[in-house]
Image (cartoon, helix red, strand yellow):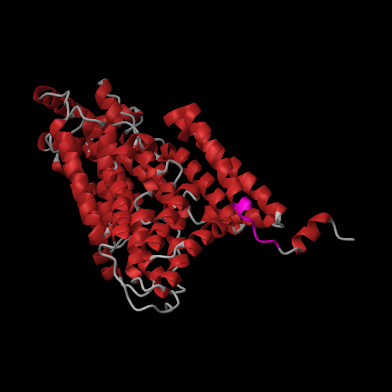
């Protein structure tokens, strides 16, 4: 006589009802709201992870009620987590990079030169522009934010400016560059999934929504800078530069790691390998150019070779700690290390395991199906894509889910209703890609908080491009402006090789 578990394993799971699909979302919303109310901006330190994992367990129980066995759900959760391992390794490498860039004086040098060149009135607009250019060159908002972004956020308090606004400007610029770069993974992936549109056509199509959104964002940043009540005067800025110079040797040579990072990225060396090698090389450079800093960091009593090895290991593993005695300098240029990224890794794992169970149990498809079915007009169809991408970024907590599922689900109906394929690819990027860093438990939001040191809820109101880009997409949909049409048809099959490579485009 078969045991109960065998009977369940042989049963074909039944499709979820709408209530089945909504129930885990309702539990998630309640738990997330509770953690934010109770813990505020500190929620990402553990409470959000607990809320996500609890919601995942609840989703699993609902799925088991529908006939899914625990082993299948477990494998789905493991598979969901496994898909993010590439991004997690890159996240750890960025932590190591920040640690060695602090120790080698790379970030202090950028800050010292930056506060001398960038005036407070143009600081936020300049940060957004520079990050957009670097993001376009590297094709990676993650790399841009984790390197120059860290330095720019460090400059803000020296100039008497808000770190939250600086982080918003970094993220705005980084995502503009990421979206418009032919090196970006989502910029390559989305048109491939949609079919019928090349990467070049996809980028040209996005200009219509990106240009006005970023233009308005730059004007807002400029307006904030021109009207900001700046606390720092020129004398205090010069004093800060002198304090940096008293601790670190400031020279153009310290910028060599930035050049190395850009060159390796352009040559398409894999992201993790690029970042890790630059982090390791920067640690060696620090031992040559900043011997006093290295000695103060680990204690120079064990001999030069051993001291150097200990310093590189420590900066990459647990982060660099400045011991100058100047509280401002020590606060600005301490941090990084792989260990600093572990709460972010935990958050990503919790979010992806919940999303994987939701997808495996058919809950996500059940939620999307009514949206697709009820979209009768072109405007309604585009607005449905917007709502789906935003919803998936919030519910699934992963940028890839938010761009891959809508690209696959809506491609057929777009073609049958005579909307050009790049209308779908553009809308997916306008919403799925750029709103991902605005969700604290999304892998992108968790990453930005981890590297910039600014909670998502604090920088969110100032990530103007990321907010405005979906708004522009909605306005175009409602007015019919810049909406391209084609003769209705059935689309060609998507490229079966176009599968998510396992790391977000921001990497």
Is residue 94 visible in the rendered structure shown here? Answer: yes
Q: Is residue 135 above or below residue 225?
A: below
Position of residue 360 measured from the top left corner of the image (x, y, whole percent): 60, 58
* 114 with respect to 192 (left or right): left
Position of residue 314 measured from the top left corner of the image (x, y, whole percent): 39, 36
Label count reads 0
Q: Nearer the viewer, residue 193 or 387?
A: 387
Q: Is residue 274 above or below residue 376?
A: above
Segment colored magenta:
13-21
* 182 with respect to 111 (left or right): right
When asked about the image quadrant of residue 382, the answer is bottom left
Is residue 264 visible in the rendered structure shown here? Answer: no
Residue that lies at the very extreme toward the right in this rendered image: 1
Q: Residue at x 16, y 26 (%)?
A: 230
When asked about the image quadrant of residue 486, the answer is bottom left
Q: Magenta span has 16?
A: yes
Q: Magenta span has 201?
A: no
Position of residue 472 measured from the top left corner of the image (x, y, whole percent): 28, 53
Q: Which quarter shows the N terminus?
A: bottom right
Q: Is residue 305 above or below residue 158?
A: below
Q: Residue at x 37, y 65 (%)?
A: 378
Q: Nearer the viewer, residue 18 or 243?
A: 18
């Amino acid at each position: 006589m078969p045991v109960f578990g065998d009977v369940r394993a042989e049963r074909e799971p039944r499709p979820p009802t709408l209530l089945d699909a909504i129930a885990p979302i309702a539990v998630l919303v309640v738990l997330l709201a509770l953690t934010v109310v109770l813990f505020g901006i500190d929620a990402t330190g553990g409470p959000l992870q607990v809320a996500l994992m609890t919601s995942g367990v609840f989703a699993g129980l609902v799925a088991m009620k529908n006939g899914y066995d625990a082993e299948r759900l477990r494998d789905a959760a493991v598979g969901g987590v496994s898909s993010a391992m590439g991004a997690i390794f890159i996240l750890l490498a960025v932590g190591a990079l920040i640690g060695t860039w602090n120790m080698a004086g790379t970030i202090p040098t950028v800050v010292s030169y930056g506060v001398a060149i960038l005036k407070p009135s143009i600081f936020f607009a300049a940060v957004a522009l520079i990050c957009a250019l670097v993001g376009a060159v590297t094709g990676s908002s993650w790399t841009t934010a984790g390197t120059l972004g860290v330095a720019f956020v460090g400059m803000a308090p020296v100039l008497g400016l808000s770190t939250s606004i600086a982080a918003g400007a970094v993220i705005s610029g980084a995502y503009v560059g990421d979206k418009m770069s032919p090196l970006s993974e989502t910029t390559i992936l989305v048109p491939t999934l949609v079919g019928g549109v090349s990467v070049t056509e996809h980028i040209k199509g996005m200009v219509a929504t990106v240009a006005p959104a970023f233009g308005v964002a730059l004007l807002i940043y400029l307006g904030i800078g021109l009207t900001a009540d700046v606390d720092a005067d020129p004398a205090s800025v010069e004093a800060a530069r002198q304090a940096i110079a008293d601790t670190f040797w400031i020279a153009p040579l310290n910028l060599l790691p930035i050049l190395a990072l850009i060159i390796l990225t352009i040559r398409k060396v894999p992201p993790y390998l690029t970042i890790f090698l630059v982090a390791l090389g920067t640690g060696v450079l620090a031992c040559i150019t900043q011997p006093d800093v290295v000695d103060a960091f680990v204690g120079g009593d064990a001999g030069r070779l051993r001291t150097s090895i200990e310093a590189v290991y420590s900066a990459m593993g647990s982060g660099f700690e400045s011991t100058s005695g100047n509280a401002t300098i020590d606060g600005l240029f301490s941090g990084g290390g792989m260990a600093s990224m572990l709460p972010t890794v935990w958050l990503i794992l919790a979010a992806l395991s919940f999303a994987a169970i939701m997808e495996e149990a058919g809950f996500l498809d059940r939620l999307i199906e009514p949206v697709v079915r009820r979209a009768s007009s072109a405007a309604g169809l585009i607005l449905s894509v917007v709502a789906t991408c935003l919803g998936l970024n919030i519910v699934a907590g992963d940028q890839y889910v938010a761009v891959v599922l809508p690209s696959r689900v809506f491609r057929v109906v777009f073609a049958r209703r005579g909307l050009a394929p790049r209308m779908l690819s553009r809308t997916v990027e306008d919403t799925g890609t750029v709103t991902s860093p605005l969700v604290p438990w999304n892998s992108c939001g968790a990453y930005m908080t981890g590297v910039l040191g600014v909670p998502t809820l604090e920088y969110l109101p100032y990530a103007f491009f990321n907010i405005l880009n979906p708004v522009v997409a909605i306005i175009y949909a409602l007015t019919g402006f810049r909406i391209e049409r084609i003769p209705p048809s059935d689309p060609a099959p998507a490229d079966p090789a176009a599968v998510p490579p396992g790391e977000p485009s921001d990497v």
